[in-house]
Image: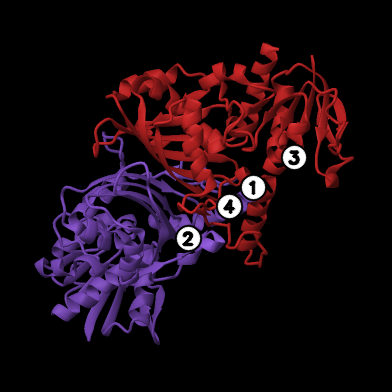
Chain colours: A red, B purple
């Protein structure tokens, strides 16, 4: 039994971590929850306990065995270097230097950690879960991917704003939105930092995190990331060129053996995964396999996953479960 | 001045054709509007006239000079072969046999018509408007495209249903939706006919219509078409490999000279086109140009256009304007 902390416990990811620790019977002896100053003193529920939210200070994590950081890159960069306990970080702050782990894919890389383990970008995770078994068999050469990303990726406030703005739109009421354009019934190219190349940070993560997690610096990725008016599941359309030939039968077979993947399609009904299907589910839903006839050894597939679960909180909790096995 | 008819005048496209004939001062001497039996007798307004909706019969189009067909493939297949007047068809019924025209691109092909001219698929049009000037200079080899298609593409009823279902969702009321899954805050792979290849009809149109309109049967296209909870503008993320090298400067310059294209981006504000920007606008909004470093001579771009305007009604009216010049 361990002393556990959640930093960012009121956020969309933090709340899911809290729920998962309970649901998965994580061996918690004491749980402390940290949030920004405006939430301090408020109560969250964990099993039969009421836990008062605290503000993080120099001494907060002294008796903690493992802390989940889910409060964004700024908080992670500020506090993780001063923290002596094990850390699972959901932000991108340490993804270059720390092991970047999706337990189903590269758990072996966990033993190189020096206290901090990073959980990958949500869109990268949803792409890589169906991709990694194929990479092992056919070796990925190049990926062209488009993402359809939910509001949750930007935090609980954007999910709330999307609902409130949509309500206002339907009632023809004015709404003062936080984005420079409407979000109700609208979508927009991902608004993370724009690099001189024209790619945004989110799209660069799809490249760098794919290379790091699949341990292949030759893999090429060109991504277009788009925020859509969906609440909490991301979808990805992936066009993948492999070095070796494949058959669809072999891919379905490989996918069927991967824990955490769910093949979701019914061709007789023309029915494939939607964000609604994957919402609240642990698995990445995949299917719509097509041989792309426009180029040799090329595959199209469609993957959908709950951004807050396997895309963030679930993966972090899975990493923590593995970390405790090692210690 | 000509006798004009609109078949499908109460549909989403038909209503825009009616509005555009007035707005563009189309030379109409008499306008007749046809709709399904349940709309017969209802009134539509054209300039200062009230026009009663009629049901189409064998004699309806005898004195018509030009008819717009915007009531779907079944009506087009049934009635167009029996029609002697000029026809501009918005459905896919005759896109293989008739000239398939985007006036800015291949107006020269109009003179091969034998009474019927087809207006292309909306997603193909939005892809091809920014693509054709680049094809002329650099020759397209292969396109990987993902679409983000609005409700309007399936008709006025789906736009209405999306609004009503979203309202019900926000009020936690049950809603009996016509799709086999929710559409409010959800998206789904395009549900047109699924071919054994795994591609749906909409995705095949992107291939065949691109080849026909650009008059290059060698062009390769692999598309993933997705319906998103947006009302009436489609977005497309296109990854295009050319035979020849290009520079971004030259592409911006080429685009700036194309009527009907609008370069919409502000890199200093990380601001690119959204469906909301393009709604109600005649132009296809394009930008987010990136050199894709993963492969030689490869470009990424983003295009957004009003599905009901350049994607359908506007293109049909532009074709009709050109047809009348020829006659």
Give the percent coordinates (x, y) of residue A281. Answer: 58, 29
Name the residue tied to disc 4.
B166
Query: Which residue in the structure is indicated by mark 2?
Result: B275
- Please say if B247 is above or below A135: below
Which chain does the residue under circle 3 lie in? Answer: A
Residue B322 picture quarter: bottom left
Specify the subunit that label 1 lies on: B
Viewer can see residue A263 = no
Label 1: how many Cα within 10 Å (few below 14, some 14–19, many 20+): few
Q: Earlier in the sequence, mark 4 or mark 1?
A: 4
**Residue annotated with mark 1:** B173
Counting residues from the start of the chain, the first of labels 1 and 2 encountered is 1
For the point 30% across and 70% down, which residue is it? B258
The 10 Å Cα crowd at callout 2, few under 14, some 14 to 19, many 20 or more, is many
Q: In what element is the residue under mark 4?
A: helix
Q: Which residue is mark 3?
A: A78
Q: Quadrant of residue B255?
A: bottom left
Whole-number angstrom distance, CA of label 2 to CA of label 4: 18 Å
């Amino acid at each position: 039994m361990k002393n556990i902390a959640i930093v960012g416990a009121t956020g969309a990811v933090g709340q899911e971590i809290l729920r998962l620790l309970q649901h998965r019977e994580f061996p918690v002896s004491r749980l402390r929850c940290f949030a920004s100053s405006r939430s301090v003193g408020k109560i969250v529920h964990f099993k039969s306990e009421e836990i008062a939210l605290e503000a993080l200070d120099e001494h907060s994590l002294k008796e903690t065995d493992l802390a989940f950081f889910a409060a964004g890159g700024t908080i992670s960069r500020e506090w993780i270097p001063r923290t002596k306990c094990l850390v699972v970080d959901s932000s991108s702050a340490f993804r270059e230097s720390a092991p970047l782990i999706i337990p189903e894919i590269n758990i072996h890389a966990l033993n190189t950690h020096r206290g901090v383990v990073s959980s990958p970008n949500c869109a990268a995770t949803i792409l890589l879960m169906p991709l990694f078994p194929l990479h092992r068999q056919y070796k990925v050469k190049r990926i062209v991917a488009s993402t359809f990303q939910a509001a949750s990726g930007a935090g609980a406030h954007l999910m709330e704003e999307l609902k409130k703005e949509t309500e206002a739109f339907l009632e023809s009421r004015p709404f003062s939105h936080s984005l420079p354009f409407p979000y109700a019934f609208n979508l927009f190219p991902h608004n993370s930092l724009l690099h001189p190349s024209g790619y945004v940070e989110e799209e660069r993560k799809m490249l760098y995190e794919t290379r790091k997690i699949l341990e292949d610096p030759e893999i090429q990725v060109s991504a277009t990331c788009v925020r859509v008016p969906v609440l909490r599941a991301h979808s990805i359309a992936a066009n993948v060129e492999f070095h070796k030939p494949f058959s669809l039968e072999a891919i379905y077979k490989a996918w069927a053996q991967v824990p955490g993947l769910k093949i979701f399609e019914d061709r007789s009904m023309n029915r494939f995964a939607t964000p609604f299907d994957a919402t609240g589910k642990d698995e990445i839903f995949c299917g719509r396999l097509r041989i792309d006839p426009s180029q040799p050894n090329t595959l199209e597939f469609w993957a959908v996953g709950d951004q807050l679960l396997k895309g963030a909180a679930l993966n972090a909790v899975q990493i923590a479960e593995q970390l405790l096995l090692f210690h």
